[in-house]
Image: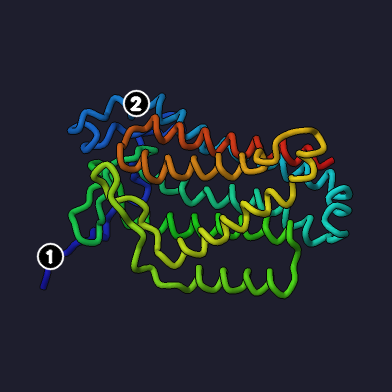
Amino acid sequence: MGTQKYNENSDPSLGYYPRPGWEWQKPEAKTYLVEHDLAKYARAWILNLVELVHWLPFVPTFILSFLIFQHSSELHALLGSSDMQVFLLLLSPIVQTFGGLMGITMHEYEGWQVVFFQNPLDTDFEIRDCNNEWLREVAYKLLFLMQGAGLLAFSLGVFGINKITLTFAIISGVIAFIGPQNPKATFNFNGQPVFPLSVSILVVFIINAIVNFVAYFFLFNSALVAVNLPVFLAGVAPILLMLGGVIEGVVAESTFNQWWHFTAVIFLNLGMVAQIYFFGLLW
């Protein structure tokens, strides 16, 4: 019989954070960061800034959703008198931002430190040393499912619901939800494995991102022309959001420099603010 790996008397209230656990109290830099001279980027005040900018997107999200609600009559006329399309546009930023809670949950568990990821399923994992790779994989799956749903809601809000778009939505949802978790689209960057997302979800996400990008131009083209602004500006918001995701998922999670983590979410916030500006051109 193997050695017992669990403790029935484990303290259920024991946490990873310093006692008493005020929000600004963060764990000491993990062993990997200390050994690789990266602990200087994981001081408590830096980690608090990283946490702050992760929560900030909720502010522009609620502002944008309220503005869409407030100007629903104008959008109703613009979108062919469809209540459902207006509702989907309102829902889109909320779904995407709340999808970010998957990442926030992972970061809260990890003490807001991006560190070398070690899989507890095949190693002697210790949270004080490194980050949980399996948790990252689960967070990625749920994050991209929610982000994809938000992209799809926006596209349906712009193009409407018909046989083509409804079929596209159903196929996207089915493949993303029931598709196999392996193989994954993981690749090495800066000598570290990044992007542990299943290929099936990634393919669905990329296709929906392309459709979403087209939807931005379809929705804002006339408004930009009316105020003598270049049409290519319609792509600013989705590009900023994409850059934020790439910087966090590829650069921050391979360099383990918390400032890259901070920078990534700044781009996400700018993407949300840009959406507020461009929607304002519609009314």
Q: Residue at x 68, y 54 (%)?
A: 215
Where does the image place residue 54, in percent across and percent down from the top left? Answer: 51, 38
Viewer can see residue 94: yes
Where does the image place residue 233, in percent across and percent down from the top left? Answer: 66, 38
Q: Earlier in the sequence, mark 1 or mark 2?
A: 1
Q: Residue at x 24, y 61 (%)?
A: 121
| SS at mark 1 in the image | loop
Viewer can see residue 127: no
Task: Please tell me which residue lies in front, 173 or 246.
Answer: 246
Residue type at the position of mark 1: Thr
Nearer the observer, disc 1 or disc 2?
2
| SS at mark 2 in the image | loop
Residue type at the position of mark 2: Arg
Task: Please tell me which residue lies in front, 109 or 255.
Answer: 255
**Lateral position of residue 195 relative to residue 178, left or right:** left
Disc 1: CA contacts within 10 A as few (<14), some (14-19) or many (>=20): few
Where does the image place residue 274, in percent across and percent down from the top left? Answer: 65, 36
Task: Please tell me which residue lies in front, 263 or 111.
Answer: 263
Q: Residue at x 70, y 41 (%)?
A: 231
**Lateral position of residue 257 relative to residue 37, left or right:** right
Can you tell which mark lies on residue 43? 2
Give the CA separation, mark 1 to mark 2: 38 Å
**What's the image's color scheme?**
rainbow
Q: Residue at x 59, y 34 (%)?
A: 270
Q: Which residue is mark 1?
A: 3
Can you tell which mark lies on residue 45? none
Where on the picture, by quarter, is residue 272? top right
The C terminus, quarter of image: top right
The N terminus, quarter of image: bottom left
Q: Is residue 163 above or below residue 17?
A: below
Task: Please tell me which residue lies in front, 176 or 187.
Answer: 187
Disc 2: CA contacts within 10 A as few (<14), some (14-19) or many (>=20): some
